[in-house]
Amino acid sequence: MRIFCVANQKGGVGKTTTTVNLAAGLAQVGQRVLVVDLDPQGNATMGSGIDKRSLDPSVYDVLLGSATVAETARESPKTGYRVLGANRELAGAEVELVGLEQRERRLKNALATVKSDYDFVLIDCPPSLSLLTLNGLVSAHGVIVPMQCEYFALEGLSDLVNTIKQVHANLNRELEIIGLLRVMFDPRITLQQQVSEQLKAHFGAKVFDTVIPRNVRLAEAPSYGQPGVTFDPSSKGAQAFVEFAREVVQRLK
């Protein structure tokens, strides 16, 4: 089982879109996938067709040890993957975790119990560096970083790289950047092409070959409670994510 965090300390870069569409793409190419929603907003939960208001138990209960992953994970209706869902309750976990033993390893320990049930676990982290994000990073083998090719994106990236280095040094020796995924890409914009070239020059093979184009259908899909990959499989964005899923599987061979 490979556990990946989808993380970027900059908000609005398409972390949740990347998480649910990569999950749907991986399910399409025959992988057993679990999505863990660690964001109290619960967007990955809703975007997978699961009503966050009716969650009981949720990832909150898993972190506090009152429910197991196996009891809590739910089937996402149209996608072929399962979800450990989140809702507003999770915001309170932040405070409650502080007093608990092994507070940054709660998720890691919980996921260890389902090791043989999944090929991939994708964790959707909140944008801030919180105890929730830390639980994600401590659990993971690596980080997939979705980023827009814009000037400020590079600044956010250096913050994230520093965070990953610190977690690697102190809490999780396995943690590394698996790759950078260029999202919402518009090749007609010169600046985006320049930033894309800078990324490749600086990070080399860590930049995924697949590029996710700016795509209306990907943006519309969450309001229908599903990822773009299942909402409109023929759209350019959906096809790019299935291609990306294949690339991820290939890299790990």
Image: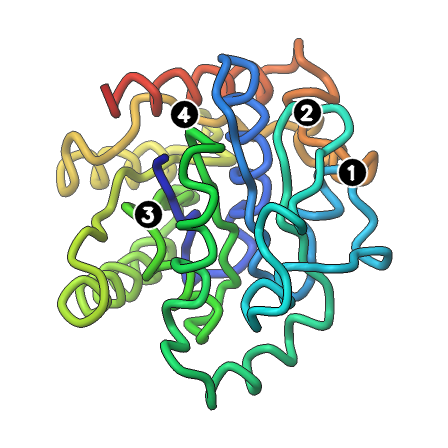
Q: Position of residue 155 (x, y in %)?
A: 30, 62
Image height check: is 40 above or below 189?
Answer: below
In the rendered structure, which amino acid carries the disc numbered 4?
Val
In the rendered structure, which amino acid carries the disc numbered 1?
Gly
Secondary structure of the residue carrying tag 2 is loop
Sequence order check, earlier mark of 3 and 4? 3
Name the residue tied to disc 1: 49
In front: mark 3 or mark 4? 3
Residue 211, numbered label: 4
Q: CA distance from mark 2 to mark 3?
A: 23 Å
Sequence order check, earlier mark of 2 and 4? 2
The image shows a total of numbered marks equal to: 4
Q: CA distance from mark 2 to mark 1?
A: 9 Å
Residue that appears at 48% across and 20% down: 31
Residue 176, numbered label: none
In the rendered structure, which amino acid carries the disc numbered 2?
Thr
Name the residue tied to disc 3: 143
